[in-house]
Image (cartoon, helix red, strand yellow):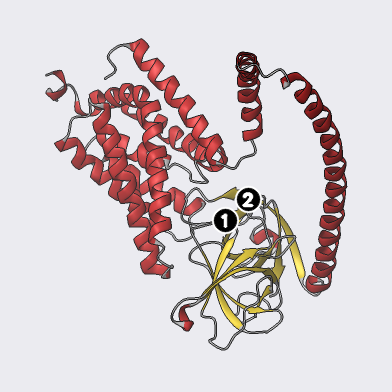
Amino acid sequence: MRKVIINIALIITTIILYILQANLFNWFTIAGVMPNLFVIFILFIGLFGSKTMGTIYGLTVGLFLDFVIGARIGVNCLGLGIIGFLAMIFDKNFSKDSRMTIMVMVMVATIIFEVIVYLINYIIVSINVEIINFIRILAIEVLYNVILTIITYPIIQKAGYYIENEYKGNKILTRYF
Amino acid sequence: MYRSKKAGIIGIVITIIILIFIVIFSNGDSNNTFFENIASNLVMPIQNGLTYLKNQLSGNDTFFTDINKLNEENEELKQKNSQLEQSLRELENIKTENETLKEYLNLTEKYGEYKTIPGYVINKDISNYSKTIVISIGKKDGVEEQMTVIGDKGLVGHVISVTDSTAKVQTIIDTASSVSCSMSTTKDSIVCKGTLDDMSLLRAMYIPTEANIIQGDSIETSGLGGIYPKGIHIGTVKKVTNTQNLTDRYALIETAVDFNKLDTVLVINNK
Protein backbone atom coordinates (compact mmCIF):
# COMPACT_ATOMS: atom_id res chain seq x y z
CA MET A 1 0.00 0.00 0.00
CA ARG A 2 2.82 2.36 0.95
CA LYS A 3 4.55 1.60 -2.34
CA VAL A 4 1.40 2.60 -4.23
CA ILE A 5 1.26 5.89 -2.31
CA ILE A 6 4.96 6.50 -3.04
CA ASN A 7 4.40 5.93 -6.77
CA ILE A 8 1.33 8.20 -6.84
CA ALA A 9 3.38 10.88 -5.05
CA LEU A 10 6.19 10.50 -7.60
CA ILE A 11 3.73 10.86 -10.52
CA ILE A 12 2.23 13.99 -8.94
CA THR A 13 5.78 15.33 -8.39
CA THR A 14 6.53 14.74 -12.11
CA ILE A 15 3.55 16.90 -13.07
CA ILE A 16 4.49 19.60 -10.56
CA LEU A 17 8.08 19.58 -11.86
CA TYR A 18 6.81 19.88 -15.43
CA ILE A 19 4.68 22.91 -14.49
CA LEU A 20 7.66 24.48 -12.69
CA GLN A 21 10.05 23.77 -15.57
CA ALA A 22 7.68 25.03 -18.27
CA ASN A 23 6.46 28.14 -16.47
CA LEU A 24 8.58 29.34 -13.53
CA PHE A 25 12.00 28.35 -14.86
CA ASN A 26 11.17 29.61 -18.35
CA TRP A 27 11.68 33.15 -17.03
CA PHE A 28 13.60 32.53 -13.76
CA THR A 29 16.78 31.83 -15.70
CA ILE A 30 20.49 32.44 -15.26
CA ALA A 31 21.61 34.35 -18.36
CA GLY A 32 18.70 32.83 -20.29
CA VAL A 33 19.57 29.27 -19.26
CA MET A 34 17.04 27.03 -17.49
CA PRO A 35 17.89 24.25 -15.01
CA ASN A 36 16.85 20.66 -15.76
CA LEU A 37 14.69 19.50 -12.88
CA PHE A 38 14.00 16.11 -14.44
CA VAL A 39 17.64 15.05 -14.35
CA ILE A 40 17.73 15.75 -10.58
CA PHE A 41 14.39 13.98 -10.12
CA ILE A 42 15.32 10.80 -12.02
CA LEU A 43 18.72 10.68 -10.33
CA PHE A 44 16.96 10.93 -6.98
CA ILE A 45 14.55 8.08 -7.83
CA GLY A 46 17.41 5.91 -9.12
CA LEU A 47 19.51 6.53 -6.01
CA PHE A 48 16.84 5.83 -3.42
CA GLY A 49 14.37 3.56 -5.20
CA SER A 50 14.64 -0.08 -6.17
CA LYS A 51 17.21 -1.30 -8.73
CA THR A 52 15.12 -0.80 -11.84
CA MET A 53 12.98 2.08 -10.57
CA GLY A 54 15.28 4.84 -11.86
CA THR A 55 15.49 3.41 -15.36
CA ILE A 56 11.73 2.74 -15.57
CA TYR A 57 10.86 6.22 -14.32
CA GLY A 58 13.53 7.74 -16.60
CA LEU A 59 12.08 6.06 -19.68
CA THR A 60 8.47 6.89 -18.73
CA VAL A 61 9.04 10.52 -17.74
CA GLY A 62 11.26 11.00 -20.83
CA LEU A 63 8.54 9.59 -23.08
CA PHE A 64 5.98 11.87 -21.43
CA LEU A 65 8.21 14.90 -22.13
CA ASP A 66 8.75 13.75 -25.72
CA PHE A 67 4.99 13.54 -26.27
CA VAL A 68 4.23 16.86 -24.63
CA ILE A 69 6.95 19.12 -26.02
CA GLY A 70 9.72 17.15 -27.70
CA ALA A 71 10.39 17.62 -31.38
CA ARG A 72 11.42 13.97 -31.81
CA ILE A 73 9.96 11.05 -29.87
CA GLY A 74 12.52 9.03 -27.91
CA VAL A 75 15.27 11.59 -27.30
CA ASN A 76 14.35 12.55 -23.73
CA CYS A 77 13.17 8.99 -23.13
CA LEU A 78 16.59 7.54 -23.90
CA GLY A 79 18.47 10.36 -22.11
CA LEU A 80 16.52 10.09 -18.86
CA GLY A 81 16.52 6.27 -19.07
CA ILE A 82 20.31 6.35 -19.10
CA ILE A 83 20.30 8.78 -16.13
CA GLY A 84 18.10 6.31 -14.21
CA PHE A 85 20.54 3.52 -14.99
CA LEU A 86 23.48 5.73 -14.06
CA ALA A 87 21.81 6.50 -10.72
CA MET A 88 21.66 2.76 -9.99
CA ILE A 89 25.43 2.51 -10.63
CA PHE A 90 26.03 5.56 -8.39
CA ASP A 91 23.92 3.95 -5.66
CA LYS A 92 26.04 0.79 -5.76
CA ASN A 93 29.38 2.60 -5.61
CA PHE A 94 28.94 5.80 -3.62
CA SER A 95 27.49 6.96 -0.32
CA LYS A 96 24.48 9.24 -0.46
CA ASP A 97 25.02 10.81 2.94
CA SER A 98 27.36 13.50 1.76
CA ARG A 99 25.87 16.62 0.24
CA MET A 100 29.03 17.00 -1.83
CA THR A 101 28.65 13.51 -3.36
CA ILE A 102 25.05 14.25 -4.34
CA MET A 103 26.17 17.57 -5.90
CA VAL A 104 28.88 15.82 -7.94
CA MET A 105 26.36 13.17 -9.02
CA VAL A 106 23.94 15.88 -10.20
CA MET A 107 26.81 17.58 -12.03
CA VAL A 108 27.86 14.37 -13.83
CA ALA A 109 24.26 13.35 -14.59
CA THR A 110 23.39 16.77 -16.09
CA ILE A 111 26.50 16.71 -18.31
CA ILE A 112 25.85 13.13 -19.47
CA PHE A 113 22.16 13.79 -20.17
CA GLU A 114 22.74 16.95 -22.22
CA VAL A 115 25.65 15.44 -24.17
CA ILE A 116 23.54 12.35 -25.03
CA VAL A 117 20.55 14.48 -26.14
CA TYR A 118 22.82 16.77 -28.18
CA LEU A 119 24.54 13.80 -29.83
CA ILE A 120 21.22 12.13 -30.70
CA ASN A 121 19.96 15.37 -32.24
CA TYR A 122 23.23 15.72 -34.14
CA ILE A 123 22.90 12.21 -35.56
CA ILE A 124 19.18 12.46 -36.40
CA VAL A 125 18.89 15.98 -37.78
CA SER A 126 22.56 16.94 -38.30
CA ILE A 127 22.39 20.18 -36.33
CA ASN A 128 25.33 22.57 -36.51
CA VAL A 129 27.83 21.72 -33.81
CA GLU A 130 28.45 24.83 -31.71
CA ILE A 131 30.85 23.53 -29.09
CA ILE A 132 31.59 26.82 -27.33
CA ASN A 133 27.92 27.81 -27.02
CA PHE A 134 27.01 24.29 -25.95
CA ILE A 135 29.66 24.29 -23.21
CA ARG A 136 28.61 27.77 -22.04
CA ILE A 137 24.94 26.77 -21.73
CA LEU A 138 25.86 23.41 -20.17
CA ALA A 139 28.13 25.06 -17.55
CA ILE A 140 25.35 27.43 -16.47
CA GLU A 141 22.81 24.60 -16.44
CA VAL A 142 25.09 22.44 -14.28
CA LEU A 143 25.62 25.35 -11.87
CA TYR A 144 21.87 25.99 -11.70
CA ASN A 145 21.13 22.30 -11.03
CA VAL A 146 23.78 22.19 -8.30
CA ILE A 147 22.32 25.30 -6.62
CA LEU A 148 18.84 23.75 -6.71
CA THR A 149 20.26 20.54 -5.24
CA ILE A 150 21.79 22.47 -2.34
CA ILE A 151 18.43 24.14 -1.68
CA THR A 152 16.35 20.95 -1.94
CA TYR A 153 18.89 18.61 -0.31
CA PRO A 154 17.02 18.21 3.03
CA ILE A 155 13.78 17.30 1.19
CA ILE A 156 15.64 14.97 -1.18
CA GLN A 157 17.31 13.20 1.73
CA LYS A 158 14.20 12.88 3.88
CA ALA A 159 11.95 11.66 1.07
CA GLY A 160 14.78 9.55 -0.31
CA TYR A 161 15.38 7.56 2.86
CA TYR A 162 11.65 7.07 3.28
CA ILE A 163 11.48 5.53 -0.21
CA GLU A 164 14.69 3.55 0.39
CA ASN A 165 13.41 2.03 3.62
CA GLU A 166 10.23 1.02 1.86
CA TYR A 167 11.93 -0.56 -1.14
CA LYS A 168 15.20 -1.86 0.27
CA GLY A 169 14.39 -2.14 3.96
CA ASN A 170 17.06 -1.35 6.54
CA LYS A 171 19.52 -3.76 5.00
CA ILE A 172 22.00 -1.14 3.93
CA LEU A 173 24.28 -0.51 6.84
CA THR A 174 26.88 1.73 5.23
CA ARG A 175 25.20 4.93 6.27
CA TYR A 176 25.18 3.96 9.94
CA PHE A 177 28.95 3.74 10.13
CA MET B 1 24.32 15.94 6.50
CA TYR B 2 24.11 19.45 7.93
CA ARG B 3 25.95 19.88 11.23
CA SER B 4 22.88 21.39 12.85
CA LYS B 5 19.35 22.15 11.70
CA LYS B 6 19.83 25.92 12.19
CA ALA B 7 23.03 25.98 10.13
CA GLY B 8 21.29 23.99 7.42
CA ILE B 9 18.37 26.43 7.20
CA ILE B 10 20.75 29.44 7.13
CA GLY B 11 22.75 27.74 4.36
CA ILE B 12 19.62 27.13 2.27
CA VAL B 13 18.34 30.70 2.79
CA ILE B 14 21.73 32.14 1.74
CA THR B 15 21.77 29.88 -1.36
CA ILE B 16 18.25 31.01 -2.33
CA ILE B 17 19.25 34.69 -1.93
CA ILE B 18 22.40 34.13 -4.02
CA LEU B 19 20.32 32.34 -6.70
CA ILE B 20 17.83 35.24 -6.86
CA PHE B 21 20.69 37.74 -7.23
CA ILE B 22 22.37 35.64 -9.95
CA VAL B 23 19.06 35.43 -11.87
CA ILE B 24 18.40 39.17 -11.54
CA PHE B 25 21.87 40.32 -12.53
CA SER B 26 22.38 37.78 -15.32
CA ASN B 27 19.18 38.72 -17.14
CA GLY B 28 19.61 42.23 -18.54
CA ASP B 29 20.09 45.49 -16.73
CA SER B 30 16.46 46.51 -16.23
CA ASN B 31 16.69 46.12 -12.47
CA ASN B 32 20.10 47.69 -12.12
CA THR B 33 18.83 51.26 -11.78
CA PHE B 34 16.79 50.31 -8.74
CA PHE B 35 19.75 48.73 -6.98
CA GLU B 36 22.06 51.53 -8.13
CA ASN B 37 19.66 54.05 -6.56
CA ILE B 38 19.63 52.18 -3.26
CA ALA B 39 23.43 51.88 -3.22
CA SER B 40 23.81 55.53 -4.18
CA ASN B 41 21.38 56.70 -1.48
CA LEU B 42 23.29 54.72 1.10
CA VAL B 43 26.76 55.84 0.11
CA MET B 44 26.29 59.41 -1.10
CA PRO B 45 25.55 61.15 2.27
CA ILE B 46 28.70 59.62 3.75
CA GLN B 47 30.66 60.51 0.63
CA ASN B 48 29.40 64.13 0.76
CA GLY B 49 30.30 64.41 4.45
CA LEU B 50 33.79 63.08 3.82
CA THR B 51 34.33 65.48 0.91
CA TYR B 52 33.18 68.40 3.07
CA LEU B 53 35.58 67.39 5.84
CA LYS B 54 38.43 66.94 3.39
CA ASN B 55 37.86 70.39 1.92
CA GLN B 56 37.62 71.97 5.35
CA LEU B 57 40.87 70.43 6.43
CA SER B 58 42.72 71.45 3.31
CA GLY B 59 41.48 75.05 3.77
CA ASN B 60 39.54 75.12 0.53
CA ASP B 61 37.12 78.00 1.29
CA THR B 62 35.92 78.31 -2.28
CA PHE B 63 34.22 74.94 -1.97
CA PHE B 64 30.75 76.30 -1.13
CA THR B 65 30.74 79.15 -3.68
CA ASP B 66 31.88 76.78 -6.40
CA ILE B 67 29.44 74.10 -5.46
CA ASN B 68 26.54 76.61 -5.49
CA LYS B 69 27.45 77.73 -9.00
CA LEU B 70 27.86 74.18 -10.15
CA ASN B 71 24.52 73.22 -8.62
CA GLU B 72 22.75 76.01 -10.53
CA GLU B 73 24.48 75.08 -13.74
CA ASN B 74 23.69 71.45 -13.13
CA GLU B 75 19.99 72.23 -12.61
CA GLU B 76 19.85 74.19 -15.88
CA LEU B 77 21.56 71.41 -17.79
CA LYS B 78 19.29 68.80 -16.23
CA GLN B 79 16.21 70.76 -17.35
CA LYS B 80 17.58 71.10 -20.88
CA ASN B 81 18.49 67.46 -20.93
CA SER B 82 15.05 66.34 -19.85
CA GLN B 83 13.45 68.56 -22.52
CA LEU B 84 15.70 67.03 -25.17
CA GLU B 85 15.03 63.53 -23.89
CA GLN B 86 11.31 64.20 -24.01
CA SER B 87 11.42 65.28 -27.66
CA LEU B 88 13.68 62.36 -28.51
CA ARG B 89 11.21 59.94 -26.95
CA GLU B 90 8.34 61.50 -28.89
CA LEU B 91 10.32 61.16 -32.12
CA GLU B 92 11.19 57.54 -31.33
CA ASN B 93 7.54 56.79 -30.61
CA ILE B 94 6.49 58.26 -33.93
CA LYS B 95 9.26 56.31 -35.69
CA THR B 96 8.23 53.01 -34.07
CA GLU B 97 4.57 53.66 -34.80
CA ASN B 98 5.43 54.42 -38.41
CA GLU B 99 7.48 51.23 -38.74
CA THR B 100 4.77 49.07 -37.13
CA LEU B 101 2.09 50.52 -39.40
CA LYS B 102 4.30 49.90 -42.42
CA GLU B 103 4.89 46.29 -41.31
CA TYR B 104 1.18 45.65 -40.74
CA LEU B 105 0.41 47.12 -44.15
CA ASN B 106 3.06 44.94 -45.74
CA LEU B 107 1.84 41.83 -43.89
CA THR B 108 -1.78 42.34 -44.91
CA GLU B 109 -0.74 42.84 -48.49
CA LYS B 110 1.74 39.95 -48.43
CA TYR B 111 -0.30 37.35 -46.60
CA GLY B 112 -3.74 38.51 -47.72
CA GLU B 113 -3.77 35.78 -50.33
CA TYR B 114 -3.40 33.01 -47.72
CA LYS B 115 -6.11 31.54 -45.57
CA THR B 116 -4.89 31.72 -41.98
CA ILE B 117 -5.93 30.13 -38.67
CA PRO B 118 -5.19 32.20 -35.52
CA GLY B 119 -3.83 30.56 -32.37
CA TYR B 120 -1.99 31.21 -29.11
CA VAL B 121 1.32 29.93 -27.82
CA ILE B 122 0.44 27.73 -24.84
CA ASN B 123 3.78 26.10 -24.07
CA LYS B 124 7.43 26.77 -24.68
CA ASP B 125 10.31 24.30 -24.78
CA ILE B 126 11.71 23.09 -21.48
CA SER B 127 15.17 22.47 -22.91
CA ASN B 128 17.97 24.97 -23.42
CA TYR B 129 18.98 23.40 -26.72
CA SER B 130 15.77 23.20 -28.71
CA LYS B 131 13.14 25.83 -29.38
CA THR B 132 9.85 24.10 -30.01
CA ILE B 133 6.52 25.69 -29.07
CA VAL B 134 3.03 24.32 -28.62
CA ILE B 135 0.05 26.27 -29.99
CA SER B 136 -3.61 26.16 -29.01
CA ILE B 137 -4.99 24.95 -32.35
CA GLY B 138 -4.98 21.46 -33.79
CA LYS B 139 -6.66 19.03 -36.18
CA LYS B 140 -10.12 20.27 -35.14
CA ASP B 141 -9.23 23.74 -36.39
CA GLY B 142 -7.81 22.46 -39.68
CA VAL B 143 -4.13 22.47 -38.75
CA GLU B 144 -1.98 19.82 -40.42
CA GLU B 145 1.68 18.85 -40.32
CA GLN B 146 4.13 20.92 -42.39
CA MET B 147 1.90 23.99 -42.33
CA THR B 148 3.68 27.34 -42.04
CA VAL B 149 3.32 29.40 -38.87
CA ILE B 150 3.77 33.18 -38.89
CA GLY B 151 3.75 35.90 -36.24
CA ASP B 152 2.76 39.54 -36.52
CA LYS B 153 6.13 40.49 -37.99
CA GLY B 154 7.25 37.45 -39.93
CA LEU B 155 8.00 33.74 -40.06
CA VAL B 156 7.80 31.67 -36.84
CA GLY B 157 8.28 28.09 -38.07
CA HIS B 158 6.33 25.05 -39.22
CA VAL B 159 4.04 22.47 -37.65
CA ILE B 160 5.82 19.18 -36.88
CA SER B 161 3.03 17.26 -35.15
CA VAL B 162 -0.65 17.79 -34.44
CA THR B 163 -3.12 16.53 -31.85
CA ASP B 164 -6.85 17.27 -31.88
CA SER B 165 -6.52 20.56 -30.07
CA THR B 166 -2.80 21.43 -30.10
CA ALA B 167 0.10 21.53 -32.52
CA LYS B 168 3.87 21.39 -32.01
CA VAL B 169 5.77 24.01 -33.96
CA GLN B 170 9.47 23.87 -34.73
CA THR B 171 10.57 27.51 -34.71
CA ILE B 172 13.14 28.86 -37.16
CA ILE B 173 15.52 29.56 -34.23
CA ASP B 174 15.69 25.86 -33.35
CA THR B 175 19.13 24.43 -34.12
CA ALA B 176 17.51 21.64 -36.15
CA SER B 177 15.70 24.11 -38.41
CA SER B 178 16.90 25.08 -41.89
CA VAL B 179 15.01 27.58 -44.02
CA SER B 180 15.77 28.32 -47.65
CA CYS B 181 15.76 32.10 -48.02
CA SER B 182 16.57 34.86 -50.44
CA MET B 183 17.80 38.40 -49.97
CA SER B 184 15.20 40.99 -50.97
CA THR B 185 17.52 43.25 -53.00
CA THR B 186 19.96 40.87 -54.68
CA LYS B 187 17.64 37.81 -54.74
CA ASP B 188 20.59 35.54 -53.87
CA SER B 189 19.66 32.24 -52.27
CA ILE B 190 20.93 31.35 -48.79
CA VAL B 191 20.07 28.87 -46.03
CA CYS B 192 19.18 30.17 -42.55
CA LYS B 193 19.80 27.90 -39.56
CA GLY B 194 19.01 28.37 -35.88
CA THR B 195 21.82 28.89 -33.37
CA LEU B 196 22.34 28.16 -29.69
CA ASP B 197 23.78 31.62 -29.25
CA ASP B 198 20.73 33.82 -29.20
CA MET B 199 16.93 33.68 -29.21
CA SER B 200 16.73 36.20 -32.05
CA LEU B 201 19.60 35.25 -34.35
CA LEU B 202 19.85 32.93 -37.33
CA ARG B 203 23.00 31.92 -39.13
CA ALA B 204 22.85 32.39 -42.91
CA MET B 205 25.03 29.77 -44.58
CA TYR B 206 25.89 28.48 -48.05
CA ILE B 207 26.16 32.03 -49.38
CA PRO B 208 27.07 31.95 -53.09
CA THR B 209 30.63 33.22 -53.66
CA GLU B 210 29.49 35.90 -56.08
CA ALA B 211 26.66 37.06 -53.80
CA ASN B 212 26.79 40.53 -52.34
CA ILE B 213 25.36 40.66 -48.81
CA ILE B 214 24.21 44.05 -47.63
CA GLN B 215 23.93 44.76 -43.93
CA GLY B 216 20.33 45.64 -43.05
CA ASP B 217 18.97 43.86 -46.11
CA SER B 218 15.64 42.11 -45.67
CA ILE B 219 15.53 38.30 -45.81
CA GLU B 220 12.49 36.38 -47.08
CA THR B 221 11.62 32.75 -47.65
CA SER B 222 12.53 31.59 -51.15
CA GLY B 223 9.77 28.98 -51.46
CA LEU B 224 12.29 26.20 -52.08
CA GLY B 225 11.93 23.05 -49.99
CA GLY B 226 8.16 22.90 -50.16
CA ILE B 227 7.32 23.82 -46.56
CA TYR B 228 7.37 27.60 -46.50
CA PRO B 229 5.56 29.68 -49.14
CA LYS B 230 7.63 32.24 -51.02
CA GLY B 231 8.04 35.80 -49.78
CA ILE B 232 7.47 35.53 -46.02
CA HIS B 233 9.62 38.02 -44.13
CA ILE B 234 12.21 36.42 -41.81
CA GLY B 235 14.41 39.25 -40.62
CA THR B 236 17.30 41.53 -41.55
CA VAL B 237 21.04 40.98 -42.02
CA LYS B 238 22.73 42.06 -38.79
CA LYS B 239 26.35 41.17 -39.39
CA VAL B 240 28.41 39.60 -42.13
CA THR B 241 31.44 37.51 -41.13
CA ASN B 242 34.03 36.93 -43.81
CA THR B 243 36.35 33.95 -43.45
CA GLN B 244 39.58 33.06 -45.24
CA ASN B 245 37.67 30.70 -47.45
CA LEU B 246 34.92 32.60 -49.27
CA THR B 247 32.59 29.60 -49.32
CA ASP B 248 32.61 29.43 -45.51
CA ARG B 249 31.52 33.00 -44.90
CA TYR B 250 28.27 33.48 -43.01
CA ALA B 251 25.89 36.21 -41.93
CA LEU B 252 23.85 36.69 -38.78
CA ILE B 253 20.19 37.39 -39.38
CA GLU B 254 18.12 39.15 -36.74
CA THR B 255 14.64 37.65 -36.74
CA ALA B 256 11.70 40.00 -37.20
CA VAL B 257 9.68 38.02 -34.65
CA ASP B 258 10.61 38.47 -31.00
CA PHE B 259 10.48 34.86 -29.81
CA ASN B 260 10.71 35.86 -26.16
CA LYS B 261 7.43 37.75 -26.43
CA LEU B 262 5.68 35.53 -28.95
CA ASP B 263 2.03 35.07 -27.91
CA THR B 264 -0.20 34.97 -30.96
CA VAL B 265 0.49 33.14 -34.21
CA LEU B 266 -1.22 32.49 -37.53
CA VAL B 267 -1.07 29.11 -39.25
CA ILE B 268 -1.15 29.40 -43.03
CA ASN B 269 -3.58 26.91 -44.51
CA ASN B 270 -2.01 26.29 -47.90
CA LYS B 271 -3.43 22.83 -48.47
Q: Quadrant of the N terminus of chain B?
A: top left
* A45 vs B218: above or below: above
Check disc 2: other Cα within 10 Å, few if <14, some if 14-19, many if 20+: few
Q: Residues within 10 Å of mark 1 (few under 14, many from 20)?
A: some
Mark 1 or mark 2: which comes first in sequence?
1
- In this rendering, position of residue A161 left or right of residue B255: left
Residues behind callouts 1 and 2 on a single chain = yes
Label 1 vs label 2: CA separation?
7 Å
Q: Position of residue B121 (x, y in %)?
A: 65, 51
Q: Horizontal and vertical percent for residue A18?
A: 49, 40
Residue A29 in the image: above or below residue A161: below
Q: Is residue B170 left or right of residue B263?
A: left
B180 or A53: which is nearer to us? Answer: B180
Q: Secondary structure at mark 2?
A: loop
Q: Chain of mark 2?
A: B
Q: Amino acid at mark 1?
A: Met
Apparent side of residue A148 relative to residue B99 in the rendered image (left or right): left
Question: Contact, CB < 8 Å: mark 1 with mark 2?
Answer: yes
Between residue B1 and residue B126, name the one nearer to us: B1
Is A129 situated above or below B35?
below
Tell me, yes or no, if residue A22 can be seen here. yes
| Amino acid type, label 2 | Asn
Which residue lies under the disc numbered 1?
A: B199
Q: Residue A124, position in %: x, y?
A: 39, 68
Can residue A48 be seen in the rendering of this structure? Answer: no
Q: Tell which of B176 and A64 is nearer to you.
A: B176
Q: Position of residue B250 (x, y in %)?
A: 52, 74
Residue identified by numbered label 2: B260
Q: Secondary structure at mark 1?
A: loop
Q: Residue at x 52, y 36 (%)?
A: B23
Res B61 → quadrant: top right
Task: Work out which quarter of the rendered image holds the C terminus of chain B and state it.
Answer: bottom right
